Amino acid sequence: MTSERWEWLRGQMPVTRDYAYMNSGWSGPISIPVVDAMKQRLELELEHGPTTRAVMDDRIALGERFRELQARILNASPSEISITGNTTEGVNIAVNGLDYGPDDEVVVSTSEHGSGMVPAYYLRERHGVGVQIAQVHGKQSPGEALEAYASVIGAHTKLVIISEISYSTGQLLPLKEIVTAAHRHGARVLVDGAQTAGHIPIDVRASEVDYYAVPSHKWLCGPDGLGALYVREDLIPTLAPVKVSGRAAASYDFEGNFAPEREKITKYELTTISPALLAGTNAAADIYLESGAQAVFDRARELNRYAEQRFEGIDRVTVTSPEDEGSRTGLFLFSVEGEEPQRVTAYLQQQAKVVCRTVAQFNSVRLSLHCFNTEGEIDRAAETVERAIREGIPDDVTPATAFEARADRMT
């Protein structure tokens, strides 16, 4: 893709007129086509009501289109895509849908998101499952990261939970090799894809991963409140639904007869799914696929390299995200000696309208560099950090809000 594509995309995102929006890893900016698609769907209901034939047919078509588009993003089959509310719901379906014995173990890592860590800990609380933690950090090479996982995967491993891109380090992990190591011991692998969908090319066939959960609202730049879960087709019968509705029944009557649904991916879905969210997510997926997954990822890494070069030259700044090309992504992280990252993040937004976030675990500020971002915005962020170091951050600069502080522990 040429720069004209990225400039067109910026033009579809009004937020970029005033802000250097570098926070797609938390929640990406929605675009005019996404909002238009949602409006059109709501107007259809406004004019015809939610349950007339034309509107119901459109609802079904939107769901089918959603599965098709998410399948293209993941290189899967639509019959392997369940509609969820977000990544975390998909993770929970996979984690809690397995049977566990007293000797079973689950593997997570030190750079894992709370949506993977906390479900693992709850398995320990509820079922006595062992939790093994791989020592993973952003400066490792892919080979070193693989060794960290391989050292804790063994005969008792039931499930490996992995963020293919770590939200806290920006590190791209060697998924295929970790899957191979896990499968060698008979373990399953679940990917938290919160930082991958809309960011990097995903190929569940090539990686041979078992389960893969993704959201709409982050790098895909769709609306909040929707996600997808991939379950490899042959594993659908073996993964039980943890919340159930009529879709989880193959048949039942009112005389005590019941047969559970085992084969269909829809058994994980409950009842009402917002058609407006489906329409908006489908529009966002269309834009992403038209842009090209590899082109988007290449542009994000190009911006990361530029940011690395720009920030490395700033006194008292340390780049904390990966510098190894095999691990590099659109997530760029840095720390400022002598300053709390929450105050740096607040100063960036208040002084220069640079929107980013902190990662308290690693004392870092994180810039999510998407294909619509620019080198000029990176310069704007760097110049603001230089000013903060040179002049100091005023005492009246407000650190993170309560919501942001809470999100620092979970997003």
Image (spheres, rainbow, N blue to C red):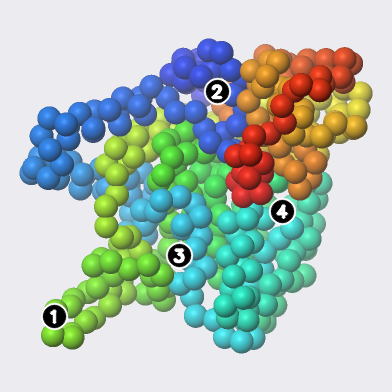
> Percent position (x, y) of residue 114?
63, 55
Q: Earlier in the sequence, mark 1 or mark 4?
A: 4
The residue carrying mark 3 is 93
Q: Earlier in the sequence, mark 2 or mark 4?
A: 4
Mark 3 and 1 residues: CB-CB less than 8 Å, in contact?
no
The residue carrying mark 2 is 372
Relative horizontal placement of residue 322, taking residue 354 as reference (left or right)? right
The residue sitting at 41% across, 30% down in the picture is 287
Q: CA distance from mark 1 to mark 2?
A: 55 Å
Q: Report the amino acid beneath label 4.
A: Ser
> Percent position (x, y) of residue 404?
63, 38
Q: CA distance from mark 1 to mark 4?
A: 49 Å
| Numbered disc in front, either 2 or 3 | 3
> Percent position (x, y) of residue 367?
68, 31
Q: Report the amino acid beneath label 3.
A: Ile
| Numbered disc in front, either 1 or 4 | 1
Closest to the observer, 312 or 349: 349
Q: CA distance from mark 2 to mark 4?
A: 27 Å
Mark 1 element type:
loop
Relative horizontal placement of residue 274, taking residue 298 as reference (left or right)? left
The residue sitting at 90% across, 32% down in the picture is 338
The residue carrying mark 1 is 254
Mark 4 element type:
loop
Mark 3 Cα within 10 Å, few/some/many (few <14, many 20+)? many
Q: Earlier in the sequence, mark 3 or mark 4?
A: 3
Mark 3 and 4 residues: CB-CB less than 8 Å, in contact?
no
